[in-house]
């Protein structure tokens, strides 16, 4: 039965990877895979020889001697445990997404456009690279990419020029998301899973992530695509933005950034701090919206609420729920493999058979090569299940360098293919970037950045 469950997982994983070819949203195979895996476990609970205790991160003793009712009770407890851990991540993401949508409701991101006052292609490249690196660490790499490409579309009309910038934005956004606990879904998973802390994540990964962004950007600045000046640095008249746009931008970003601080002070799970931040931002959003509030929906065109009685309701309606359901499906499906001890066994075989390349991971028993391969793998397949699997495979303590290397590799490795990260996929959709164009023009830059950052990490972990 274990073999059948693994086959179901592999087929679901394959359907997720080939979503563009199959024309099926990846949330569908993720949810089906989750439900089928757990259904097979429930129907065949008596046939499994072992069970993995996620709380103690070890195989349960004498599982085979338990009765049917005891095994079913244990399975239900395990399922509830994993659902709770998954819900922490999903509620956290819902809060962050809502704050970003509230900022966008007040046209807050238009404020960023004022930073670009040059016609030089090279300078614009550096401005957007640093903006992507910093913004992605605050509002996550996916949202940062959407925001910056939207601004880029207003600055540069020539799509052939613009897609070059989009390619470098993907690299910079993924690099920026790796060193922040709220910058990338995979890093957030490691943070909420109590594998990394904010301080150590910054200390270990900031320099490698910065180099991962700087080196490709520096090389790209010498390419013909970034020479000369752009013809249309400004698209003309912009629609008037809300007078509260700048306030809401800084308030929203401050709210998201305060979450790690809240966790450090209170030791409560991160989603609690995110809900507090959302509540505070929502209060100001309602106040600013109500200043131009009309009691009917036929409101003045200049009103901030744009015909909607609540900016919070409007923002919640724009949340990307398919992504939330995808994370639910994939994380719970991986939890099924973990519960049967399959991931634990796979990790043990890796540790026994892979060569040791690094000197600092001898006590961890995990090769640098394994993590580097995981980074390359994240460019081909989704990095969320890869990191979810690593959580079940390895039992190293919090802030072990293994977890930081996994955070870096999974976060930045996806830049090597345009389908390898959420930032790349959304850029592909927004600019209709061809897969092979990216592979030919941008992938080698991403690979260089990834390797330079990985080497830098191997040095920084020996210092700190």
Image (cartoon, grey):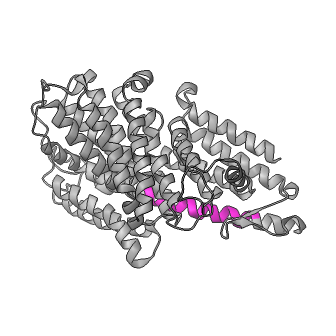
Q: Is residue 139 visible?
A: yes
Q: Position of residue 257 (x, y in %)?
A: 31, 63
Residue 115 drawn in magenta: no
**294 to the left or right of 446:** left
Choose between 373 and 88: the one closer to the eye: 373
Task: Decide whether residue 79 is among the magenta residues.
Answer: yes
- Image quadrant where residue 57 sits: bottom right
224 and 3: which one is in front?
Answer: 224
Q: Could you tell me how many numbered marks the image carries?
A: 0
Q: Residue at x 44, y 22 (%)?
A: 436
In the rendered image, the vertical position of residue 345 relative to residue 230, given as above or below: below
Q: Does the magenta stretch mainly form a helix, a strand or a loop?
A: helix
Vertical order, 206 against 373 (above or below): below
Nearer to the camera, 330 or 417: 417
Q: Position of residue 56 (x, y in %)?
A: 67, 70
Residue 135: x %, y % from top left:
29, 50
Q: Position of residue 310 (x, y in %)?
A: 29, 56
Q: Quadrant of residue 277?
A: bottom left
Give the magenta part as a residue range. 75-93
């Amino acid at each position: 039965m274990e073999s059948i469950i693994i086959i179901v997982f592999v087929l679901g994983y394959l359907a997720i990877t080939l979503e563009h070819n199959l024309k099926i949203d990846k949330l569908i195979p993720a949810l089906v895979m989750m439900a089928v895996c757990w259904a097979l476990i429930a129907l065949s609970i008596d046939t499994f020889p072992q069970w993995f205790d996620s709380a103690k991160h070890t195989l349960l003793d004498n599982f085979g001697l338990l009765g049917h009712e005891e095994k079913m009770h244990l399975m239900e407890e395990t399922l509830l445990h994993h659902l709770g851990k998954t819900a922490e991540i999903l509620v956290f993401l819902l809060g962050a997404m809502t704050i970003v949508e509230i900022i966008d409701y007040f046209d807050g991101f238009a404020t960023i456009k004022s930073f670009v006052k040059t016609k030089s292609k090279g300078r614009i490249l550096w401005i957007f690279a640093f903006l992507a690196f910093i913004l992605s660490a605050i509002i996550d790499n996916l949202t940062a990419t959407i925001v910056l490409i939207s601004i880029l579309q207003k600055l540069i009309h020539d799509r052939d020029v613009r897609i070059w910038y989009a390619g470098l934005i993907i690299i910079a956004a993924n690099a920026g998301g790796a060193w922040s606990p709220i910058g990338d879904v995979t890093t957030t998973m490691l943070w909420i899973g109590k594998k990394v802390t904010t301080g150590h994540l910054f200390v270990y990964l900031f320099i490698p992530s910065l180099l991962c962004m700087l080196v490709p950007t520096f090389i790209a600045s010498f390419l013909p695509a970034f020479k000369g000046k752009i013809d249309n640095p400004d698209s003309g008249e912009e629609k008037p933005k809300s007078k509260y746009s700048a306030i809401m931008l800084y308030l929203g970003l401050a709210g998201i950034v305060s979450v790690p601080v809240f966790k450090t002070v209170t030791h409560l799970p991160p989603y609690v701090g995110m809900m507090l931040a959302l509540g505070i931002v929502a209060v100001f959003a309602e106040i600013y919206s109500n200043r131009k509030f009309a009691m009917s929906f036929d409101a003045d065109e200049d009103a901030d609420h744009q015909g909607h009685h609540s900016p919070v309701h409007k923002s919640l309606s724009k949340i990307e729920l398919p992504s939330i359901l995808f994370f639910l499906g994939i994380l719970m499906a991986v939890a099924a493999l973990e519960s049967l001890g399959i991931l634990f066994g796979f990790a043990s075989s890796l540790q026994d058979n892979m060569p040791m390349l690094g000197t600092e991971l001898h006590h961890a028993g995990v090769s640098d090569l394994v993590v580097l391969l995981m980074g390359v793998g994240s460019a081909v397949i989704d990095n969320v299940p890869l990191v979810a699997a690593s959580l079940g495979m390895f039992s190293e303590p919090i802030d072990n360098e293994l977890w930081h290397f996994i955070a870096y590799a999974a976060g930045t490795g996806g830049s090597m293919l345009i389908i390898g990260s959420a930032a790349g996929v959304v850029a592909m959709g927004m600019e209709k970037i061809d897969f092979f164009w990216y592979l030919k023009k941008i992938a080698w830059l991403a690979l260089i950045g990834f390797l330079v950052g990985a080497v830098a990490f191997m040095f920084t972990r020996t210092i700190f």
